Amino acid sequence: MDKLVITGGARLSGEVAISGAKNAALPILCASLLSTEPLTLTNVPGLNDIGTMLKLLAQMGVKIEREGNRVTLDASGLNNPLAPYELVKTMRASILVLGPLLARCSEAKVSLPGGCAIGARPVDQHIKGLLAMGAEVGVEHGYVVAKTTAGNGKLKGAHLFTDMVTVTGTENLMMAACLADGETIIENAAREPEVVDLAQCLVSMGAQISGAGTDVIRIRGVERLHGATHRIMPDRIETGTFLCAAAATGGEIRLTGTSTGYLDAVVDKLMDAGCEIVGEKTPGRESIHIIAPARLKAVSIRTAPYPAFPTDMQAQFMAINAVADGTAIIRETIFENRFMHAVELQRLGADIQIDGNTAVMKGVEKLQGATVMATDLRASASLVIAGLVAEGETHIERIYHLDRGYDHIEAKLTALGAAIRREKA
Ligand code: UD1
């Protein structure tokens, strides 16, 4: 299994291109299932999760052409509405095929998902919504088994209310509703920019959707969706991660192909920490410029659904607070078990006290390199940031998590001046 070896101390500088968003690309790839005409996507990131999703779609009968960051999916031959455990177990987002399969094939069998070990992460809200839309849904031998019950094989439009804000739940139900009979209203919908990107893609395929980006989304079902071309939005979490890496190292970098508009809450906190951050826009080019002070001030955060501070940036802020000046309190309100990186950061010398969903951190002058283990995707990113500022060598094991969600991270960091290499463990 590969590991990363980082020699800390380099101040990041230069320019880095941000890739397309993993969490937008995954649902949008699934949207291809809704049409018999090809969907072409550009700015698709080169990630293991994308590879897993493409494999999953291919075994259902979707024809896929991939050339660099451009992917064309042709689901005209869709013949196997099954998502087997072997493919689903590494990636929770596989559940996103459930809604589109049911809408297009009137039946679906999808393994219960695996993915990051950051809490129980049930899919009851996805199922509740599909039940309200007239589907019969059960869980058999670890699989969600669903079929429509109406004579015409369609789902029925319904008034849905999710018990909590769920991103993939909103996306699954929005896709399912596109081909349903009548209007579906999703209340308490997730407002994440990735939900909006998916809605924009669906609209360009002929769907009738309004309200994406607010907490009430209305979808009027149509007979069929057609082919389209769509550019995946920039990855706001990759953007935030590079901003944190620059911030922690006292660096100055420019991030291209992305904008501050997607991550106000994160930018705000980095500015509180003492960074200067400017979004720049010239025709055809958007970028962000960050200049970090020699030492950051500690900043407290509380995660919550968009537009509040994203849980996917919590671990990276734990890393920057580890070496900041002062005390910070971090509250995780989305997932119940998302502090696994704290123990690893402590191995590097961080001062962190955990009590339930709250971490109290006292910044230390220096971290010290050690061997640590990546436990989930964003935890891995926090260990990379900590390694960049730790004295000596940090060895990060189990980096397959990182490859699920960060496009060429060590090449990008190397280009910014970091001393980072991949080794076969
Ligand atoms: C998505 C993101 C993930 C991010 C998370 C929260 C993708 C592919 N992944 O994950 O990176 O960390 O949003 O911003 O977009 N819940 C239930 N029942 C459900 C659904 C969710 O109890 O049916 C709970 C979850 O356990 C969690 C909370 O709701 O506590 C939010 O989860 P959700 O928004 O669904 O996360 P994901 O969509 O899986």
Image (spheres, grey):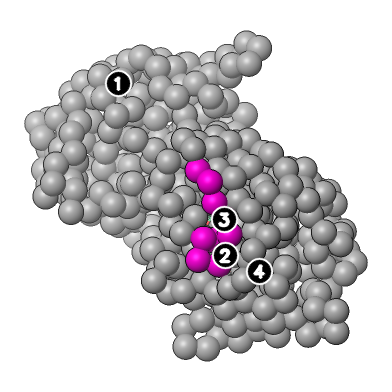
Give the secondary structure at mark 1.
helix
**Label 2: element kind:** loop
Q: Amino acid at mark 2?
A: Gly
- Give percent across and percent down for residue 339: 34, 56
Residue drawn at x 43%, y 52% is 51
Between circles 1 and 2, the one closer to the viewer is 2
On the image, which quarter does residue 392 sit in?
Answer: top left
- Nearer-N-terminus badge (1/4): 4
Observer able to see residue 281: yes
Specify few, some or many for label 2: CA neighbours under 10 Å numbering under 14, 14-19, or 20 or more: some
Residues packed near mark 3 inside 10 Å, few (<14), some (14 to 19) or many (20 plus):
some
As measured in the structure, the alpha-carbon distance from the residue carrying label 3 to the one carrying label 1 is 36 Å
Report the side of 295 relative to 168 (left or right). Answer: left
Residue type at tag 4: Leu
Asked if labels 2 and 3 touch by Cβ distance under 8 angstroms, the answer is yes
Residue 167 visible from this viewpoint: no
Circle 3 residue? 63
- The stretch in magenta equals 57-66
Q: Are marks 3 and 1 in contact (CB under 8 Å)?
A: no
Q: Point out residue 75 in the picture as x, y percentages from the top left corner.
A: 64, 58
Label number found at residue 101 = 4
